[in-house]
Image: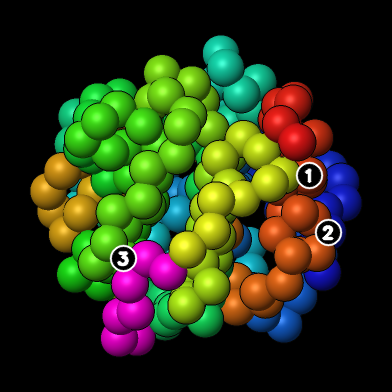
Amino acid sequence: MLRRRNLGRRRCKKFGGWTPLLDTGLLIWLLAGYGMTLDGDGKVMYWDGMGGGARVTFTVRPTPVASDAVFGRPSLNFAGNCFGTATVTQSDTSSMLVVARGSSNDTILLAGGGGIRALYNTPTGKWGCYNGTQKDSTVSLATPAIELVRWGTASKLYVNARTPATGNWGAKAQSTEITVGAYSGSRYCNGVIAEVVITTTQTDANDLNLLNQAAAYYGFTLGA
């Protein structure tokens, strides 16, 4: 089970915050304020995962925000078609979580190689996911979200709630790359991303643990 603990500033290059205790299923954990290497203009060149050993290399570099007005924590502003990629092997036995604020319809926040297993802002202006089949939530894009998707034949989609929508949103081959902030260099997020988790631990208990910890950290109230 994934847990956080406060270790002060020892592992923080710019911001104070939390660091997690990691489970064996973690593929990548990106937390704004940690592991960020800035260029001379103060943009983020690299975002190192706090677990899993992966690094996001940005092609178009986002701006770090020390305390986001909505989340009250560090975040990355992806305005200006910012995006980056990392080598992370994920499949339909993995789950993705993102804490984000969108900007416009039909844009991607986080995607696997070739755009599959994507968390995105749907054409209808809702938070949702895509894995060959589109699944919309009922939550408007105007609402900042903690979104978690468990891929596989028994798919689950949580958006600001502890009770998921369920279904089978398409089976896809394994992918070895993720894109943060876009779909393979297009359909850019242009919003704000505070946290990304990808894990192979697919249980209801772990889903709720991730959701509850994120909600507590960012001061969100999750629905039933």
Which of the 4 quarters of the picture holds residue 142?
Answer: top left
Please name the amino acid that badge 1 sits on: Asn
Label 1 Cα neighbours within 10 Å, binned few <14 / some 14-19 / many ≥20: some
Callout 1 secondary element: helix
Q: Would you say residue 203 sits in the magenta stretch?
A: no
The residue to which callout 3 is attached is: 131
Q: Is residue 173 magenta?
A: yes
Q: Which residue is mark 1?
A: 212
Question: In this picture, is 22 found above or below 106?
Answer: below
Where is residue 9 shown, x and y percent of the image?
Answer: 77, 43
How would you rate the neighbour count of disc 3 (Cα within 10 Å): few for under 14, some for 14-19, many for 20 or more? many
Residue at image point 78% right, 45% down = 213
134 sits to left or right of 208: left
Marks 2 and 1 sit apart, C-alpha to C-alpha, by: 10 Å
Q: Is residue 157 left or right of residue 213?
A: left
Disc with the residue nearer the chain's start (3 vs 2): 2
Dot 2 or dot 1: first in sequence order is: 2
Q: Which residues are magenta?
A: 168-175
Measure the alpha-carbon separation of dots 3 and 1.
25 Å
Residue at 56% x, 40% y is 159
Using the image as rendered, state which of residue 75 and residue 34 is in the foreground: 75
Q: Which residue is mark 2?
A: 3
| Mark nearer the viewer, 3 or 2 | 3
Whether pointer 2 and pointer 1 mark residues with C-beta atoms closer than 8 Å, the reply is no
